[in-house]
Amino acid sequence: MPDTIHIAQLELTAHIGVPDEERAEPQRLTVGLTLTPERDFSDLGDDIANAVDYHTVTLAVQVLAAERSRMLIETLAEDIAGMLLTRFAISAVDVEVRKYILPDTEFVAVRCRREVISDQLR
């Protein structure tokens, strides 16, 4: 099993939803991320320069979510995965986006896994 970094319940604010009126006001979303770094933890030498800076990851995800409106949380999940794989030294990412919109439910969530295979996203 590869070494992973898990970020749970990161708070996001986004204009998201299918009807225009739903996108008019920002909504609270949360995201869970599991990152597979390119380097094993045993290779880090206790040096942040060798590690994935998870603080920078969280800030980048929050900025991405807020930068433009989207209709689908599926699109946001895909955008997050693509950005993380191209910007950070990770070989795979699992993304779960939670939306708190439907009555009588705790949340609705989508999940995706993307990884780099031979320098291509999959």
Image (cartoon, rainbow, N blue to C red):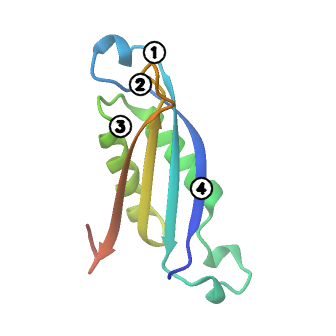
* Marks 3 and 1, how far apart at CA: 15 Å
Query: Image point 43% across, 63% down: which residue?
Result: 93
Query: Where residue 84 sits: x, y (%)?
Result: 44, 59
Q: Residue at x 32, y 73 (%)?
A: 116
Is label 3 or label 1 in front?
3
Q: Mark 1 belongs to which amino acid?
A: Glu
Per the model, the C-alpha gap separating discs 4 and 3 is 18 Å
* Badge 3 density bin: few <14, some 14–19, many ≥20, Cα 10 Å: many
Q: Earlier in the sequence, mark 4 or mark 1?
A: 4
Helix, strand or loop status at disc 1:
loop
The x and y percentages for residue 98 are 46, 38
Q: Which mark is residue 25?
A: 1
Report how far apart the C-alphas of labels 4 and 2 lie in the structure.
22 Å
Q: Amino acid at mark 2?
A: His
Q: Earlier in the sequence, mark 3 or mark 1?
A: 1
Q: Is residue 34 shown above or below 104?
A: below
Local SS, label 2 = loop
- Asked if the residues shown at circle 3 and circle 1 are in contact, with their CB atoms under 8 angstroms apart, the answer is no
Q: Are marks 1 and 2 in contact (CB under 8 Å)?
A: yes
- Which residue is located at x 50 percent, y 40 percent? 63
Identified by mark 4, the residue type is Ile
Give the alpha-carbon distance from disc 3 to disc 2, as whole Å: 10 Å
Write down the residue under mark 2.
15
The amino acid type, in three-letter code, at marker 3 is Ile
Q: In the drawing, what numbered circle is on residue 73? A: 3
Above or below for 118 versus 20: below
Mark 4 or mark 1: which is in front? Answer: 4
Residue 46: which numbered mark, if any?
Answer: none
For label 4, the residue is 7
Task: Residue 102: name its quadrant.
Answer: top left
